[in-house]
Image: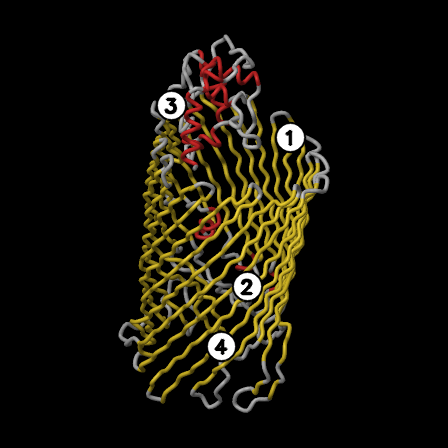
Amino acid sequence: MRLLFAISFCSVAGVAAETVDVSGLPRPVERRVDFATEIQPIFDRSCLKCHGQKRPKSGYQMTSRSLSIMGGDLGAAIHPGDSARSPLVHYIAGLVEDMEMPPEGKAPALSRDEIALVRGWIDQGADWSTPETTVTVEPYMRWITLDGNASVFRQHWGMTEGTSIGLGQVTLTGQTEAGSRVELDGRYLGGDEDHLTRLYLERPGLGYVETGYESWREFGMDTGGHLDGLESSPFRLAKGPYLDHERLWLSAGLAKPDVPTLDFSYEQLNRQGRLATQQWGGVPVGDFDSRAIHPATKRIDEQVHRISLRAEHEIGETLIEDAMTIEFGDTATSRGHAEFSSLPEPGSLPDYLTQIDETNEFKRGSNSLRMTRRLKDWWHFSLGHHFAKFDSTGSLDVVSLSPGNPGEAPWQGDRANTIRTKQRSHFVNATSLMKPAKFLTFSSGVQGESTRRQGAASGLSLGTSPARFASGLDRTGLEGNTQLTYTGLRHTVLTLGTRLREERTDHREDGHIDSDWGADGFMRDSDEEGRLAEHRFGFTWSPNTDWMVRGGYRWRDSRSQFDHLLDNDLSDEPGNGYPAFVNFRQSRGDVFDIGVTWRGYAKLVPSFRWERYRADYRLGTPAFNEPWGGPRHAGGRHLSGEQQSDVFSFSYTSRPMPRLVATTSVGYTDTWSGTIESEAMGLHPFEGDVCFYVDHLSYAFNPNTDLIFTRSYYRADYGDSNLPGAIAYGLDAERYGITLGLSHRLGEAAVFNFQYGWFNNDETSANGANDYKAHMLLASLSIDIN
C-alpha cells in the first residue's frame, strides 16, 4: 500500500509544475544572491533537520548541489534557472497541499522574503559554494616548575612538570563537489602522553568510515595514609604510579535510502602500567600492633577486543532496531601487600611481602532487539528483548616472601588454576507513550529479568591442601515505571511518577578444604525476596520569560527478606555463617530539590539550586548465641546507619561592561553519616563539608585581543572526623588554581595564545606530604591554512 502511494505521488509530482498555481509566489530578488551567507543559513535552520545526511526524509538530501537538484523519492527538486518550475519552491511556499515544508512544528517556516531569496538563487543557476579545504595547526610549548609532591599535582591537573612540546590541535576538513566530507584531526601532547589521530570519510546517500587511535595516561598518587602521632607517615613510593590507556577503532556505516541502516565498529582497548590502590600495607605502631597505611600499587596488563553491529529499518509505521556486541580479552594483575616489622625507610624493601597474581580470560556477548510502532497519532508503543552472556576462566597465585632476605624460601599461599564463572541474562520490556488528552502525556514501561550466575574454583589452600569452592545465583525480577505529565495549568508543567520492582534471588555457595589438620567446609542456601518502591513529583513554573522555578520530591524504600534454607559447616558451632546471620535489610530515604533562574536583567543571569538527601539503613537478625559460650541475643530489627546531605549550587553570568563577560559557579555540600558509635572500634559519625567556586572572565581588549582570567578554589573539611591516634580517613585540604591568558589574532589566519598559571594544594590530613606549589607558562599559535 505504501509503495503504491509513493508511485502515485511520484506521478502527481511529475506534473506538479504544470498544475501548481504559482501566481501567489513572491517575486525573486533581482540582485546577486550569495549562497554561503544567505541561502545556506536558511537550509541549516529549516531544511537539514529532515534532509541532512542521516536518514533523510523521502530520500532527499540537501547537503550538496547535485543532491539538492536531483531530489529524492519524488523526483527532481530544483530546476536551475527556473524557480517557478522547481518543486522545492512550491513546497516551501505551501502551494502543494499536505506537502508544506518544513512541516509545522519541525522547524521555522520560510518568510516571503526568504522565499524570494531562494527563487532568486535558483533563477541565477543555483550555484553552490565551492567546497573549501581547511587546515588548522596549533603548535604549543608548556613549561611547569613544581615544588612539592609531583604525583599529586599530576593526578589533580593531568599535567606533568618540566618542558612539554607538542601539537594541541591538528584539523583538516573538506568536502568534494559531489558532497563527500573528509575530516582529519588529532592532538599530540608530549609529556602528558596524550595523543589522538582520527580520520572520517562520509559519502552522502551511501555511508561513512571512521578510524583512529588515541592514548592517554592516568596518574596516581604515591602516598599512603597518615596516622596521627606517627612522624614518618604518610609513607611514599619510590616512583609515582601511572596507567596508560590505548584505544584503536574502526567503524563504518551504511545509510542508503530504503535499505536498513547498518553500523559496524571494532575497538581494541589496552591498559598497561601500575594503578594506585588503597589496599595499603601494614606498618608497626607498637608491640603486636600495626596499621595499614603503607602505599600500594597494582600492575595491570589488559587487552579487550570489542565488535559491535547495529541495524535499523523502518517498515511502514514500525521501526525495528537490533544491536549486537561481542567482547573478548584477557587481564593479568599483580599486587604486593607489604608488611613491616620495623618502621620503613624511604625506598626500603618491605620486611615481608605477599605477592598476589591473577589472570582472567573472558568472552562477553549481548544482543538487543527493539520494535517501536505508532499505533495512533497520539500513541507510540515499543517492545524489546535483551540477552547477555559472560564466560571467563582465571587463576590465582599467592606467595609470601622476604624481599630483604633472598635466601629465605618463599611460602606458598592459596593457588587456583581453574576458576570459572559464567552468567546468562534475559530482559524483556514493553513501553508506551500516550497523549490521550490535550494537556496530558502518559508514559509507562514494564520489564522482566531472569539471570543465572555460576562459579567454580579448585586448587590448593596454603599451597598443599586440596580445595574446592562453588557458588550459584538465580534471580528473577519484574519492574514497572509510570510517569504522568500535565501542562493544563497556566505557565506550569507538573510530573508525577512511580517505580515499583520485585525480585527473588536464590543464592547457593559451598566450599571444602582437605588439610593436614582435618577437613573444613561449609554449605549455604539463602532465598531473598526484595521489593522497591519509588515515587516522585516534580514541577516547573515560569510565569514569564524572566522567571523559572523548578523543584521536586522523590521518596524511595528498598527492603529485602531473607530465608536461609541451609547453613551448615564443619566447625564446633555450625550455623553461624554470614550472611545467614541477617534476615532483613532495608534502605529508605528521600530527596528534595528546588531551583530558581532569573533572566530579568540582561547583564546579570543568576541561578540557584538546593538539594537535600536523607537515608537510613536497618538490619534484622534472628536470636543467636555468641560463639564459644557467649551470651544469647534476642535479635530483631535495628537502625544500622543514617546519612544526610545538603547540596547548594549557585551560578550567574554577568556583563558589567560591553566587552566584559563574567561567569561564576559556586557549590557547597555538607554530609553526615553515622552508624553504631564505638571509640574502641574507631566508629563515630563521619561529617564535613565541601565547597568550591570557579570564576571565568573574558575581556575584549580590542577587536584582535582578548584577555581571559580563570580562578578555581576547592575546600574539603572532614578533618574533624579523624580520631586522635587513628588513620586520617577524613580529607582536610585546600586547592587553588589561577590562570591568566592573552589571545591575539595575527591577521586572518593565525591566533597567538599565551597563558600563565599558578596552582597550590595544602592537605593538612596528609601531614603536608601531598602539598605542592606550581607555576606554568604556556604558549601556542593556531594557524588556519585554507
The three-letter code of the residue at mark 4 reads Ser
Looking at the image, tell me whether mark 1 or mark 3 is earlier in sequence order: 3
Which of disc 4 and disc 1 is earlier in sequence? 4
Q: Horizontal and vertical percent for residue 551?
A: 67, 48
Q: Which residue is mark 1?
A: 655
Seen at 64% across and 55% down, the residue is: 536
Asked if residue 405 lies left or right of residue 448, the reply is left
Q: Which of 466/401 is in front?
A: 466
Q: Is 205 in front, or is 625?
A: 205
From the viewer's perspective, is residue 145 above or below residue 136?
Answer: below
Classify mark 2: helix, strand or loop. loop
**Is 775 situated above or below 339?**
above
Which numbered marker is on residue 70? 3
Neighbours of disc 4 within 10 Å: few (<14), some (14-19), many (20+): some
Give the residue at mark 4: 526
User: Circle 2 is placed at which residue position?
Assistant: 729
